[in-house]
């Protein structure tokens, strides 16, 4: 009778607070939840004989001195491992006696038996398999065991006061998400232990329906989220595979309905810092592997190609706090830290969207990512595509292609050793594109006279099939993207007007060296620079264009270059199979006399003539060279 009286008393207490209807509501909710541990409950884990419901947590007398009349024995763990992150601005400390979360831990840290009560002693339990266990506690493998013996480094922090800012805010008044009386986030901020199915899909004792991450967005407001593709995806919103893999822990279907939890998990994710569900690119691959997102967004296939950004070799090295001015230095700029290239280095998953922009501005896919400005300062966020590329391909240290210059040992393709690229700024694209000597117009326009200076320049960029890309006109003031040259060799970028759009755009992977979009010839260096080399004779202008489709995209190789409109020996050089890259640099020339036409010899192929290696432009289509090539010395060779 004593225990029956307790149930009646608890119901009476609820009635006094909530009214008879409210009391019945909460009674029904707790009775049908997993927190009903009574022996007659349908829960898999429940008491062996004890029929009462409230007794496992509450007692009217002889309870622990904590509100609300707590009956469960509390854990004796002195110090838990706590959540930490380089972007966390709040201070997280050990849950104390005044924190209601400490009461939740009396079951959910796995160190106290579920039936270990203060007033009623040890109440025997049976586990999910029906095995009787008088001292049953949540095992480390249980999703409900948050501690697992190591602490809460992989759980959303709790028992702490949030520091508000541009992306963190306190819940509004009268919201079901609420802080405790001292302004702290507790377990009950997000979970109501008496009502399991207020969100009938998730059934995680959430305080409100979390469709499209409504609960998360009560406190977190990520810049760019409202217009991002991950909030409002073009497709994949009701994909069966997505439900079974990426969104399995929520019960919701599709990207838009899972919202934040498409990529994050508030408890026990694979990566504790920032609560990311999978390691590195594997998080992105859950959708971007051709089975959820559109074929034009299949990124995993691109990273299987021979030439690619090394995303798969640097998993989870990226840190969101990186930056030239941050306390955590960017590994690419540090002279000692390992380099890395990961998806978040170029993409912000909270802000990425399908918007397009004219060169050199960032597209929506690169929205709200920081970069390096032309002058070397930080751009946060980057306004131009090249600023994001400069994070690694400018002032950063330990460039592998510099350390291994002239070789292909790293799998990027052989890199020419240029005549004038010998100083501390070697292969620094920021410096090269900001040159006052010669450069491709990536960061600024060239403003040359096309009819005299760049006679080969087309009116429009062309597809590999020769069709004009009408959205990409070419003229003296044109600025181009880095990705006009470095891009997918099988993606929709080859013909933006084509439908359907198959193959992802962007410099993820390519079958062509140096992540190039189209074919680009390199000559094989002879044993000694300047000596004879094997040349493949090219008979026609069309064949020359096919061998150099990358250059032909903007420069008419078959007509203008082949017919010597810029240089009277172009035809002869191309006919013998000399590559554009042997004489011309593809980015820019920082120093060197007479280098206006991007002439910067590959010194692995071209050697000096009697100690002199020089090119001098004396006017339109006129100049002279002093060099040694194909075993012949050319001294002041005029053309």
Image: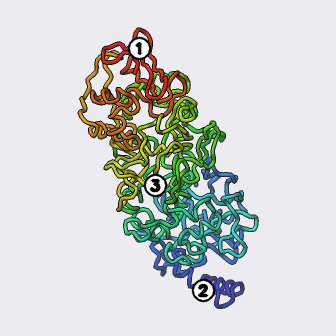
As measured in the structure, the alpha-carbon distance from the residue carrying label 3 to the one carrying label 2 is 62 Å
Residue at 59% across, 66% down: 216
In front: 301, or 25? 301
**Labelled disc at residue 25:** 2
Label 3 Cα neighbours within 10 Å, binned few <14 / some 14-19 / many ≥20: few
**Residue on which disc 1 sits:** 608
Q: Secondary structure at mark 3?
A: strand
Residues at circles 3 and 2 in contact by the CB criterion of under 8 Å: no
Q: Identify the element where label 1 is drawn.
A: loop
User: Residue 42 appears at what percent x and percent y?
Assistant: 46, 79
Q: Residue at x 41, y 61 (%)?
A: 293
Q: Position of residue 111 (x, y in %)?
A: 56, 59
Assign a secondary structure to mark 2.
helix
Q: Which quadrant of the view contains residue 65?
A: bottom right
Precedes in sequence: disc 3 or disc 2: 2
The first of marks 1 and 2 along the sequence is 2
Q: How many marks?
A: 3
Q: Nearer the viewer, mark 1 or mark 2?
A: 1
Q: Residues within 10 Å of mark 2 (few under 14, many from 20)?
A: some
Give percent across and percent down for residue 447.
55, 39
Q: Earlier in the sequence, mark 3 or mark 1?
A: 3
Where residue 2 sits, quadrant-wise, is bottom right
The N terminus: image quadrant: bottom right
Q: CA distance from mark 1 to mark 2?
A: 91 Å
Left or right: residue 500 versus residue 132 is: left
Which residue is at 71% across, 76% downward? 174
- The residue drawn where x is 54% and y is 51% is 362
- Residue under pointer 3: 471
């Amino acid at each position: 009778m004593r225990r029956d009286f307790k149930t009646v008393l608890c119901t009476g207490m609820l009635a006094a607070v909530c009214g008879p209807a409210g009391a019945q509501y909460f009674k029904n909710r707790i009775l049908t939840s997993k927190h009903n541990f009574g022996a007659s409950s349908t829960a898999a884990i429940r008491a062996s004989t004890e029929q009462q419901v409230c007794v496992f947590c509450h007692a009217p007398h002889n309870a622990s001195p904590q509100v609300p009349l707590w009956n469960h024995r509390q854990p004796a763990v002195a110090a838990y491992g706590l959540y930490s992150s380089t972007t966390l601005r709040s201070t997280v400390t050990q849950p104390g006696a005044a924190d209601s979360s400490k009461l939740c831990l009396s079951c959910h840290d796995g160190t106290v038996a579920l039936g270990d009560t203060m007033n009623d002693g040890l109440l025997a339990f049976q586990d999910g398999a029906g095995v009787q266990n008088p001292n049953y506690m949540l095992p480390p493998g249980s999703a409900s065991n948050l501690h697992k013996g190591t602490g809460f480094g992989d759980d959303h922090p709790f028992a702490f006061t949030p520091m508000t800012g541009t992306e963190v805010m306190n819940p509004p008044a009268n919201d079901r998400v609420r802080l405790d009386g001292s302004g702290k986030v507790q377990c009950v901020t997000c979970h109501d232990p008496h009502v399991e199915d207020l969100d009938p899909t998730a059934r995680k004792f959430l305080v409100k329906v979390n469709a499209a991450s409504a609960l998360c967005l009560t406190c977190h407001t990520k810049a760019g989220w409202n217009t991002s593709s991950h909030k409002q995806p073009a497709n994949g919103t009701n994909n069966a595979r997505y439900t079974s893999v990426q969104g399995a822990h929520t019960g919701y279907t599709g990207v838009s309905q899972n919202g934040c939890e498409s990529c994050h998990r508030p408890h026990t994710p694979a990566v504790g810092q920032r609560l990311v569900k999978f390691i590195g690119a594997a998080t992105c691959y859950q959708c971007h592997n051709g089975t959820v997102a559109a074929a034009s967004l299949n990124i995993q296939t691109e990273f299987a190609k021979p030439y690619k950004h090394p995303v798969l070799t640097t998993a989870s090295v990226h840190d969101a706090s990186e930056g030239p001015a941050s306390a955590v230095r960017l590994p690419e700029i540090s002279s000692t830290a390992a380099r890395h290239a990961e998806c978040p280095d170029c993409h912000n998953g909270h802000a990425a969207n399908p918007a397009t922009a004219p060169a050199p501005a960032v597209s929506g896919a690169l929205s709200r990512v920081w970069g390096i400005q032309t002058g070397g300062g930080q751009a946060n966020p980057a306004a131009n595509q090249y600023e994001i590329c400069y994070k690694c391909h400018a002032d950063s240290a330990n460039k592998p292609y510099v350390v291994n210059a002239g070789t292909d040992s790293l799998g990027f393709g052989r890199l020419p050793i240029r005549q004038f690229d010998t100083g501390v700024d070697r292969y620094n694209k920021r410096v090269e594109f900001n040159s006052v000597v010669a450069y491709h117009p990536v960061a600024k326009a060239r403003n040359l006279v096309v009819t005299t200076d760049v006679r080969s320049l087309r009116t429009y960029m062309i597809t590999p099939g020769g069709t004009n890309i009408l959205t990409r006109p070419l003229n003296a003031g044109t600025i181009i993207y880095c990705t006009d040259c470095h891009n997918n060799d099988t993606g929709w970028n080859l013909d933006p007007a084509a439908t359907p759009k198959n193959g992802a755009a962007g410099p993820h992977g390519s079958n062509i060296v140096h992540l190039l979009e189209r074919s680009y010839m390199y000559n094989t260096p002879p044993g000694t620079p300047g000596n004879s080399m094997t040349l493949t004779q090219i008979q026609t202008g069309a064949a020359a264009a096919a061998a150099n489709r990358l250059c032909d995209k903007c420069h008419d190789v078959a007509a203008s270059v082949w017919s010597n409109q810029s240089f009277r020996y172009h035809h002869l050089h191309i006919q013998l199979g000399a590559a554009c890259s042997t004489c011309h640099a593809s980015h820019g020339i920082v120093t060197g006399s007479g280098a206006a036409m991007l002439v910067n010899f590959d010194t692995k192929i071209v050697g000096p003539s009697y100690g002199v290696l020089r090119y001098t432009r004396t006017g339109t289509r006129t100049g002279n060279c002093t060099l040694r090539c194909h075993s012949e010395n050319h001294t002041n060779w005029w053309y």
